[in-house]
């Protein structure tokens, strides 16, 4: 008998029209493949609806920046990229291309995004790396949170789920975070972490690849040894 496929927890209450018809709830990471390429390929060559400082550097083709977006000086944006309404991108941020950033998102100072989807109101506000990842609506990454996207051995990413492993077919995959997921400061999510919506991840957690249920709390247990000085 063929084993049942593990159930991916609830992730997104709503997806933008561009992605809704392309979404596979059993393989949410598939949005980062052909689906994202098709959406970005449909963008106009250039559509800048917000004023930009001369210190903002744009490179490449298919760059869309919607009205109300605030792009601070020293930001580097490489196309193709979609930046929605009222997005804030703070100084020193690096948008490496292949990104879709929804309305009212925040990309923080010295944060790097690479091939990522940020659903509306998602925030990567402080010294974050978001590679080959999806942030659901209202996700907030604590300062220093890293979504790692590549195995040291270069192998394809397979996600442990019970007694099975889900073969994503991808060599690069960060995290899939459902709506409202919160991470504490200095968390590192290893390649292939899928986190159900509403889950809280405490500071300093090293979250290994896996499927994590919605509405959970992930805590770090540690022991401190305090030695009196002689």
Image: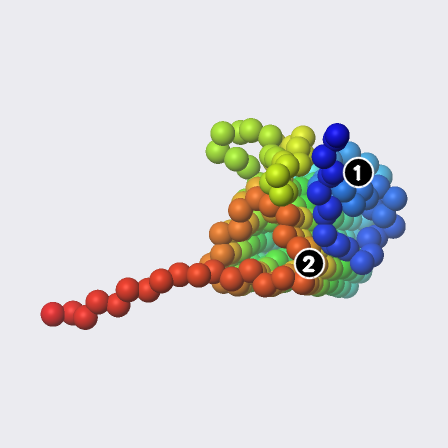
Residue in the image at 36% along x and 62% along y:
223
Q: Quadrant of the C terminus?
A: bottom left
Q: In the displayed image of the protein, which residue is found farthest to the left? A: 230
Dot 1, crowdedness within 10 Å: few (<14), some or many (≥20)? some
**Left or right of 63 in this view: 185:** left
Please tell me which residue lies in front, 210 or 132. Answer: 210
Dot 2, crowdedness within 10 Å: few (<14), some or many (≥20)? many
Q: Position of residue 118 (x, y in %)?
A: 71, 53
Q: Say whether disc 1 or disc 2 marks the residue closer to the N-terminus.
A: 1
Is residue 205 visible to the viewer in this orientation of the structure? yes
Q: Quadrant of the N terminus?
A: top right
**Left or right of 114 in this view: 226:** left
Q: Position of residue 81 (x, y in %)?
A: 73, 45
Please tell me which residue lies in front, 225 or 148. Answer: 225
Q: In the displayed image of the protein, which residue is found farthest to the front? A: 1
Please tell me which residue lies in front, 206 or 133. Answer: 206
In the drawing, what numbered circle is on residue 214?
A: 2
Residue in the image at 55% along x and 37% along y:
150
**Colour pattern of the rendering:** rainbow
**Marks 1 and 2: which is nearer the front?**
2
Q: Secondary structure at mark 2?
A: loop
Q: Secondary structure at mark 1?
A: helix
- Number of numbered discs overlaid on the protein picture: 2
In the drawing, what numbered circle is on residue 35?
A: 1
Is residue 57 visible to the viewer in this orientation of the structure? no
Residue in the image at 71% along x and 43% along y:
6
**Left or right of 184 in this view: 229:** left
Among the 4 quarters of the image, the one containing residue 40 = top right
Q: Position of residue 53 (x, y in %)?
A: 65, 57
In the drawing, what numbered circle is on residue 96?
A: none
Residue in the image at 52% along x and 35% along y:
151
User: Mark 1 and mark 2: span between their CA atoms?
Assistant: 25 Å
């Amino acid at each position: 008998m063929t084993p049942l496929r593990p159930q991916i927890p609830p992730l997104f209450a709503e997806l933008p029209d561009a992605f809704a018809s392309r979404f596979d709830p059993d393989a949410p990471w598939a949005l980062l493949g052909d689906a994202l390429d098709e959406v970005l390929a449909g963008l106009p060559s250039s559509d800048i609806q917000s004023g930009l400082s001369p210190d903002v550097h744009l490179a490449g083709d298919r760059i869309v920046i919607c009205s109300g977006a605030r792009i601070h000086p020293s930001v580097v944006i490489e196309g193709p990229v979609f930046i929605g309404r009222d997005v804030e991108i703070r100084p020193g941020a690096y948008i490496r291309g292949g990104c879709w950033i929804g309305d009212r998102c925040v990309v923080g100072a010295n944060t790097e995004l690479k091939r990522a989807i940020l659903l509306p109101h998602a925030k990567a506000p402080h010294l974050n790396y978001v590679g080959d990842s999806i942030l659901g609506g209202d996700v907030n990454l604590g300062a220093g949170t890293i979504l790692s996207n590549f195995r040291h051995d270069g192998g394809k990413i397979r996600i442990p789920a019970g007694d099975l492993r889900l073969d994503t077919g991808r060599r690069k995959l960060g995290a899939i975070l459902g709506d409202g997921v919160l991470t504490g400061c200095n968390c590192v999510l290893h390649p292939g972490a899928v986190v159900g919506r509403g889950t809280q991840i405490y500071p300093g957690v090293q979250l290994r690849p896996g499927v994590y249920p919605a509405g959970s709390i992930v805590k770090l247990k540690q022991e401190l040894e305090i030695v009196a000085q002689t």
